[in-house]
Amino acid sequence: MVDFLAENNLCGQALLRLSEFIPAVFRLKDKSDQQKYGDIICDFSYFKGPEYYDSKLEAKPDLQDLDDEFRENNLEILSRFYLAFESVHKYIVDLIRYLDDLYEGVYIQQTLETVLLNEDGKQLLCEALYLYGVMLLVIDQKMEGEVRERMLVSYYRYSAARSSADSNLDDICKLLRSTGYSSQSGAKRPANYPESYFQRVPISSTFISMVIGRLRSDDIYNQVSAYPLPEHRSTALANQAAMLYVCLYFIPSILQTQQAKMREIVDKYFPDNWVISVYMGITVNLVEAWEPYKAAKIALNYTLDSANIREQASRYSVSMEGLRPQIQQLLKEGFLREEIVLDNVPKLLNCLRDCNVSIRWLMLHTADSAYDPNNKRLRQIKDQVINDSKYNPKILFQVLLDTAQFEFTLKEMFKKMLSEKQLKWESYRTEGSERMTELAEVFSGVKPLTRVEKNENLQAWFREISKQIESLNYEDSTAAGRKTVQLIQALVEVQEFHQLESNLQVCQFLADTRKFLHQMIRTINIKEEVLITMQIVGDLSYAWQIIDSFTSIMQESIRVNPSMVTKLRATFLKLASALDLPLLRINQANSPDLLSVSQFYSGELVTYVRKVLQIIPESMFTSLAKIIKLQIHAIMEVPTRLDKDKLKDYAQLGARYEVAKLTHAISIFTEGILMMKTTLVGIIKVDPKQLLEDGIRKELVRRVAYALHKGLIFNPKAKIQDWQSVYQSTHIPIPKFPAVDESATFIGRLCREILRITDPKATCYMDQLNTWYDLKTHQEVTNNRLFSEIQDTLGTFGLNGLDRLLCFMMVKELQNFLSVFQKTILRDKAMVDVFKAMLSAVNPVKGIVANASKGYANAVAKTQKIWGPYLESIMKVGQMQILRQQIANELNYSCKFDSKHLAAALENLNKSLLADIEAHYQDPSLPYPKEDNNLLYEITASLEAAGIHNPLNKIYITTKRLPYFPIVNFLFIIAQLPKLQYSKNQGMTCRKATDPVDWSPLVLGLLTLLKQFHSRYTEQFLALIGQFIRSIMEQCTSQKIPDMPSDVVGALMFLEDYVRYTKLPRKVGLD
C-alpha cells in the first residue's frame, strides 16, 4: 500500500512539473495559431469522424507538411504528458483492484474493516482516496480541459498507441475529457462539478463511506497531542480537514442533503476557519466551494456569521500584538541559554504554537488567491477580516521572520543538546559523586577544613550518597529520575538536621551537588518528542504558493537592510519543511523516485530563494548605473597640471562622496548575501557565493539583452522549445521581450537587417573586393568590415550565433524551395511536357543540338512563368552563403590572431580525423567513430566557432530523387544569362537595374542546391551546359558569326566560377 501511495505522489509531482511545459500552441489563444494550426489540432470531436479530418489533411499538401513538422516538434512532450495521464488512470485501477482483492479474501485474515482498524492502514486508505481526488483537481486546475483533449488527440494521431491491443487510451480519454472547468478568474463553475468528474471511474461506495467515517470521527494522524489547547484544534486537524473536503466530493449526497453530518463536520473542523490548503499550498475557500450544496452551505452559516468572523479576526489581532514583543524578547542576543530553554520548554512550545497558528490563520484568510474579486460576498468577508484583524502584511511578515528564526534557533539548540545528552548527564553524575566523596573525606578528620569536626556517621552517609549517585543508570531514565529527586531531598534534609548551615564551605559543596543533580534531571528530560512537536507545529506547507505574495516585502526589506538575509534563511528552511508531505510515503516505500521528486520540490524552493535574493544584484546594478552616470557626466577628468585656484572646482566633493556612498552600498549588498551560510534546502545545497554569482550573471544577461533588444531595432517592413534549448537556463534565463517584428530576439533582427541591406535585388556583390554596391547609385553599401564590427560588439559567440541562424534560415529556404518544386513545377503538365521534349532534344548529351538557338529559346520561353520565384529562392540561398563565408573568414582570422594554438590544434585534429575516416572507407577494418560517440558532432561545433569550415560543402537538408531536376536547373541558368553581361574588370554584372540578377548569389545558390543531391545530378547539369556551349558555338561557326555570343560567355563564366568555388579540377569543366 505504501508503494502504491509512493507511485501516486510521483504522479502528482510529474503533473505539477509538466504543467509548466504545456506547448502554448495547444491553447490556440492567438488568431495566428488558430489559423495556422486549427486544422491539425483537434479536441475529442475528432473521434466522431476521424476520416473527415484525415481526408482534409490529405487534400492539402501544405497541411500535411505542417502536420509532419508539428509531430516532429511536439511528439516527445506529448508522450511525457500521456505517460503522466496514464499513471493517474493506472493508479485508480490499481486501487480498485486492491479493494476487490480485500473483499474477495486474497489477503488472508484481512478485510477492509481490519485494515481500517490498523493505524497505518487507516492513514494509507484515507490518503489513497484523497490523493486520487487531488490529482484530478490538479489536472483540471493546471491543464484546461480543451488543452488536455487536444494533447490526447494529437498523441493518438502521432503515436503507435492506437494500434496496440494493450492500450488503455480510450479509458484515459474518458477519465480526462474536458469538465468545462476553467481556473480563470470570473469563470462560471460547471454544474455538478467536481462530483461528476470524480465519478467517471466508479469506486466502491462502502469504501468511500468508511473512509469518510474515519476522517469524521478519528484523529488519524494523532495531531491533537501536539496542540493541547482547545482553540488550536482546527489547526491540529487541518490536514485531515483538507482530506475530508476532497473525499466528500466522492459522496456528494452528504454535502447536499445530510445536514446533521455536515454540521458535525463543520463544528469539528471548520468552526473558526473557511479557507483551507488542500495540497502544497493549493487554497480553497469553502464559501465558494460549498455554495451549490444545501446542507454544507447551511452548516457553514454559523462560521460565516459576521459576529463569529469578527470574534476570530479580533482574537488573532490581539494574539499578534502580544506575540510580536514576546518573540522579539526571546530572540535577543544571549537570552536563549541552555538553562532557560530546559526550564521553560512548555512555555517556549506554547509561544511557538500561538505564533504558527496566528500566522496560518491570517495568511490563509487574507490571501488574494482565496477570494474571487468578482464575488461580492467573498469581497465583503475579506474586507471584514482585514479590518477586524487590523491586518498589516509587513507586520505579519516580520512575525513570520521572527518565528522562523526562533524556531530554527530552538531546533538547533535541541539537536545539539540531544547529541550531547548522555555525555553531559554522565559528567554531571561524576561531578556530583566526586563532591560527595570529598565531603566524606572532610568529615573523616583526615582532610583539613576549617572548623569541621570528625563525624563518622556523616562520613559514612556521604560515602553512601556518592555510591548512590554513581549507581544511577542513564539507560533506565525513569528510575534514575525518581532516585535523583530522592537524593536531592536527602541533601536538603541533611543540611537542616545536622545543622551544617553554619559551615559555608560544606553548604557550598551540598549546593553544588544539588545543582548537578538538578542538571541531571533536566538533561534526562531532553526528549526527541520536543523536536517532533516543533516539526508538526512549524509546518508551512499551506504557504507554498501564498508566500509569493510577500516577495516584494522581502525584497524591500533586503534592499533597506541586507543583513535581513540571515532571518530569511530561517524562513526558507521553515518552508522546506513542506517537502515532508509529498516525500513521506515515497521514502517509506524506498522508492527509487525519491531523488527525482525531492529534486523537483527542492528545485522549486531554490528557484523561489533565487527570485527573492535577486533584489541584491538588481540593487547593485542600479547603484553601478548611478556611479557610471556620475563618472561620465558629473565628475570632470583631472588634468596632469592644475592651477591651485581651480583645485576646488575639480575636487567635486559632493559627486565623489556620492560615488563613495554608492560603492559602499554595493559592498554591503554583497556582504548581506554572503552572510547566508551554505544551506541545505531540501536536498539541494545552496552556496551563497554561487547564488551571488548567478544573480549577477542573470542581471547582466537581462541588461545586455535589453540593451541589444532596444538598440538593434531597424526600420522593419523547426521550432525549439525553451525546455529543449541547451542555451536556456532556469537560474540565469535569457529574457524574452515583446516582439517588434517577426524576429524573436535581437540576433534575428540583426540577421534580417544584414539580409535586407545585402539584398541581391537591390545590390551587386563584388567577389574580388568583398563589397556590396547599390545597383542604382553604384555607391558602396557595406563590406567585410561589417563582420569585424559585429565581432567587436557581440564577440565570437554572437558572430557564431548569427552564422547558425543563417544556417537554419538556409535550411528553411531550401525546404520551401523543394516543396514548391515538387508541388507546383512537377505537377504542371505543360511544364513536364516541355522538360520531356527538351530531354529528348539534348540526347545524347555528348552530341550537338540541332538548331540550338531556336530550341533553347523555345524551351526558355515556355517555362518563363516559373523562373521568378525560382530565381528569388536561389539568390536568397546564395546571399546567405556569401554571408556565411564572410563570417567564417572573420572567425578564422580572429581565432588565428587571438588563439593561434587553439586554431592549430583544431586544424590538425580535423585533418587527422578526415584521414582516419578516408582510411576506414578504403579499409573497413580500420577504426571509425561509433554512433554513440559525440566526437564528430562536438568537433564540428568547435570548427565552426573557429571558422575552420567551408559553408559551400555542407549538406543542409536530406533529399529524394527528383525527376527532370538537372534539365530544370539547366533551363533556369540559360534563362538568366540574357539578363547579365561580361565586363573584363568586374566579371558578370546585371544588364538592367530594373531586372536585377546578382551573379555571385546566383552561382553559389545553384551550387548549394545541387550539393544537396547525388553527384550524378551535378554531372548531368554540367554536361548540359557544356553541350549548350558546344551547340551554340557550332551554330555560330556554321553561320560565320565572328563574335562569341554573350550567353556562351556567361555559360563559360558560370563553369569557371563553379569550378573555382567547388575546388574541382578544371578537367571537369573542360570535359
Image: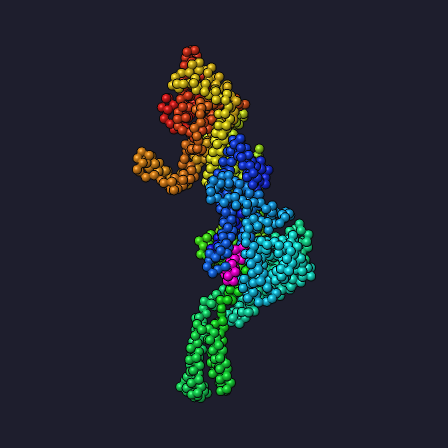
- The question of residue 121 being in magenta is answered with yes
Residue in the image at 50% along x and 67% along y: 529
- Residue 38, picture quadrant: top right
Residue 383: x %, y % from top left: 67, 56
839 vs 43, nearest the viewer: 43
Residue 1040: x %, y % from top left: 42, 11
Give the answer, above or below, for where 602 lies relative to 748: below
Quadrant location, the C terminus:
top left
700 vs 242, nearest the viewer: 242
Give the answer, above or below, for where 424 lies relative to 360: below
Q: Give the range drawn in magenta.
A: 112-130
Residue in the image at 42% along x and 85% along y: 460
User: Which residue is farthest front?
Assistant: 104
Residue 331: x %, y % from top left: 55, 65
Is 859 left or right of 908, judged from the image as shown?
right
Q: Taken as a whole, is the magenta stretch helix, strand or loop? A: helix
Residue in the image at 53% along x and 72% along y: 343
Is 372 left or right of 706, judged from the image as shown?
right
299 vs 654, nearest the viewer: 299
Give the answer, above or below, for where 234 lies relative to 897: below
Residue 1034: x %, y % from top left: 41, 14
Residue in the image at 45% along x and 87% along y: 452
470 vs 750, nearest the viewer: 470
Give the answer, above or below, for where 440 lies relative to 1050: below
- The question of residue 459 being in magenta is answered with no
User: Which residue is farthest top?
Assistant: 1039
Residue 985 seen? no
